[in-house]
């Protein structure tokens, strides 16, 4: 049994691969704009994607399914917000104020990465 996976996440995180987990086990790696086929035993499996702590939803797949991995809009927007905020903190001259702003940004970044799904996996073609 096999499924086809297409990665379409854009340039954010595009320089590194996404780990594909099938039934909780590492099964493959996929780069940006890459399509790959993943074999699995049985009639169905559960798939999830991760990259440096950023995770996706987990879905059930069946033989012949074609999947697409995309980046969620919130992840893309929060990436820009975090970058701009970190750059702006460099203009704060007082170290106490800089730390007072930097620490909440750091906490927000960690929560955003670890608790909120950054990728979305969806079936774009079901088996016949």
Image (cartoon, rainbow, N blue to C red):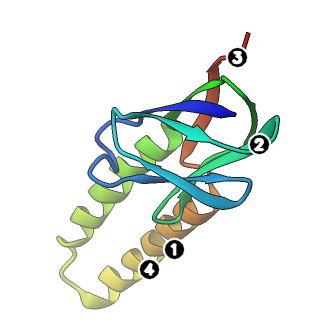
Residue at the location (52% across, 65% down)?
53
Q: Are marks 3 and 2 in contact (CB under 8 Å)?
A: no
Q: Residue 63 appears in which quarter of the rendering?
A: top right
Determine whether the residue tagged by mark 3 lies in a helix, strand or loop. Answer: loop
| Secondary structure of the residue carrying numbered label 1 | helix
Element class at badge 4 = helix
Label 3: which residue?
126
**Label placed on residue 103:** 4
Going from N to C along the chain, the mark reached first, 1 or 2, is 2
Question: Rounded to the nearest whole Å, what is the CA distance between mark 3 and mark 2?
Answer: 14 Å
Q: Between marks 4 and 1, how big is the CA–CA gap?
A: 6 Å
Q: Is residue 93 left or right of residue 106?
A: left
Is label 4 in contact with label 1 (beta carbons under 8 Å)? yes
Residue corresponding to mark 1: 107
Q: Residue at label 2?
A: 45
In the rendered view of the protein, which quadrant contains the C terminus?
top right
Answer with left or right where residue 70 lies relative to residue 2: left
| Displayed quadrant of residue 76 | top left
Determine the image quadrant of residue 121: top right
**Spatial CA span between label 2 and label 4:** 40 Å
The residue lying at 56 percent from left, 40 percent from top is 38
Marks 2 & 4, CB-CB < 8 Å contact: no
Local crowd size for mark 4, using a 10 Å CA cut-off: few (<14), some (14–19), many (≥20): few
Q: Position of residue 73 (x, y in %)?
A: 49, 35
- Element under disc 2: strand
CB under 8 Å between discs 3 and 4: no
Q: Measure how far apart labels 1 and 2 are at the Cα level.
A: 34 Å
Which residue ends up furthest to the bottom in the rendered image?
96
CA separation, marks 3 and 1?
40 Å
Farthest top residue in view: 128
Q: Is residue 58 visible?
A: no
């Amino acid at each position: 049994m096999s499924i086809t996976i297409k990665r379409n996440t854009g340039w954010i995180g595009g320089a590194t691969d996404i780990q594909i987990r099938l039934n909780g086990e590492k099964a493959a790696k996929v780069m940006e704009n890459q399509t790959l086929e993943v074999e699995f035993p049985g009639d169905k499996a559960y798939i999830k994607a991760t990259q440096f702590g950023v995770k996706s939803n987990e879905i059930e797949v069946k033989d012949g399914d074609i999947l697409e991995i995309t980046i969620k809009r919130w992840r893309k927007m929060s990436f820009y917000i975090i970058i701009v905020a970190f750059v702006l903190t460099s203009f704060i001259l007082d170290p106490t104020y800089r730390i007072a702003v930097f620490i909440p940004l750091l906490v927000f970044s960690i929560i955003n990465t670890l608790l909120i799904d950054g990728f979305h996996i969806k079936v774009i073609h079901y088996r016949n």
